[in-house]
Image: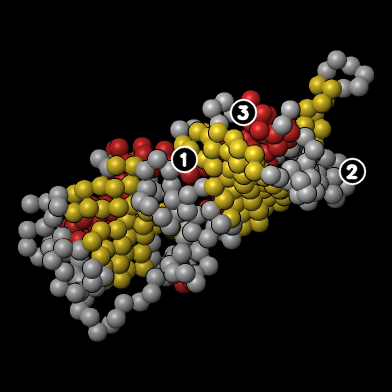
Amino acid sequence: MSLRATLEDRFPGARVVDQGSRTTAELLWDGNLYRARLEMQPLARVVVGIPSTDGFELLLRWNDRHANDSTPRAASFDDSFLVETNDLALANVWLDRDSRDALLASRYVSTKHADRDTALLIRDAAWQHEVSNDEVSARRRDGEPSLERMADMLLASLLLAGRPVRWARVFASLGRALGGEPASRIEVGGKPALRLRRGSIDVVVRVVRRLGPGDPGRLRVIVSAHRHGSAGETLSLISESLPRAAWPPPEDPSIGGFPIDRRAAELLDAAKPSTSMVRRHDVEIAFDGGHVDLDRLGAAIELAAWWAGDTRTVGPYR
């Protein structure tokens, strides 16, 4: 059997093409289309494309449970893997239960026991997994002779690549409760996770990592809106608990200040954002990390719309 036939058997409906030493596949998984490429020789590799990750890097290598003494540790995910990342908050979000279970399951190879009519599970520590450059990959230092193992690695990679879809479902439940339009999967630093409208104001919610191209990155949820009727006043509010490295660039001090009225003060108290920025042409309210509860997010959306409208006159809802 060829790798193409193996993949078509394991993933019904997949469009698989052999291209010399490389095999490509297009397949529908959990309601979304994925493109993958696989190579068995000379170095085995499985790569699945994913939406934008804004420079996020995550490397997972198998750990030796007997490295320190002869007593095996518990077969938990943390004991089994060495994890390297450039964004700890996003790594914690990415490695949800489905991702961890898929990676742990991919380590074990089922083979026939030589003496009994039972299955024997053997640990295979040759593969390592990575998220980088908007791809999920699994690779090993040498070739992979087993067609089934290649299919196993594709399955594990798809489950790891599916994290933005599962993450989007969390935002979708918030979005529906707030009357918004949710995305089908999260793009970090890309398309909005939620789109909402408050009166004449369009508000979007994004997940981002970097303040700029040279920034090392810090996971944040951003609520933003384009200002209507702006006179150029600006405002910068930064939580005392936010580390200095995560502060946004300062505004020009020569520009007039934007007043905080009673309505804005109430919404700020309810939202408790990490930063609130009113710039010349837009409003941006940020939360540190990748999770925001319904009440705080709802307050931030109302605040962004309030500030984006001309609050000195009739406001955005009247």
Q: Amino acid at mark 1?
A: Val
Compare marks 3 and 2 and give the one earlier in the sequence.
Answer: 3
Q: Which residue is mark 1?
A: 165
Residue 260: horizontal and vertical position, in percent? 20, 66
Q: From mark 3 to mark 1, how far is it between C-alphas? A: 23 Å
Going by the image, does 294 lie left or right of 71?
left
Q: Name the residue at 76% across, 46% down.
A: 41
Compared to 183, does 16 lie above or below? Answer: above
Q: Amino acid at mark 2?
A: Ser
Q: Secondary structure at mark 3?
A: helix
Q: Which residue is mark 2?
A: 70
Residue 288: horizontal and vertical position, in percent? 43, 58
Q: Name the residue at 26% across, 53% down.
A: 203
Compare marks 2 and 1 and give the one earlier in the sequence.
Answer: 2
Going by the image, does 146 lie left or right of 54?
right
Q: Name the residue at 26% across, 63% down.
A: 283
Q: Secondary structure at mark 2?
A: loop
Going by the image, does 215 lie left or right of 305?
right
Task: From the viewer's side, name the closer residue of 68 and 146.
Answer: 146
Q: Name the residue at 24% across, 84% down.
A: 254
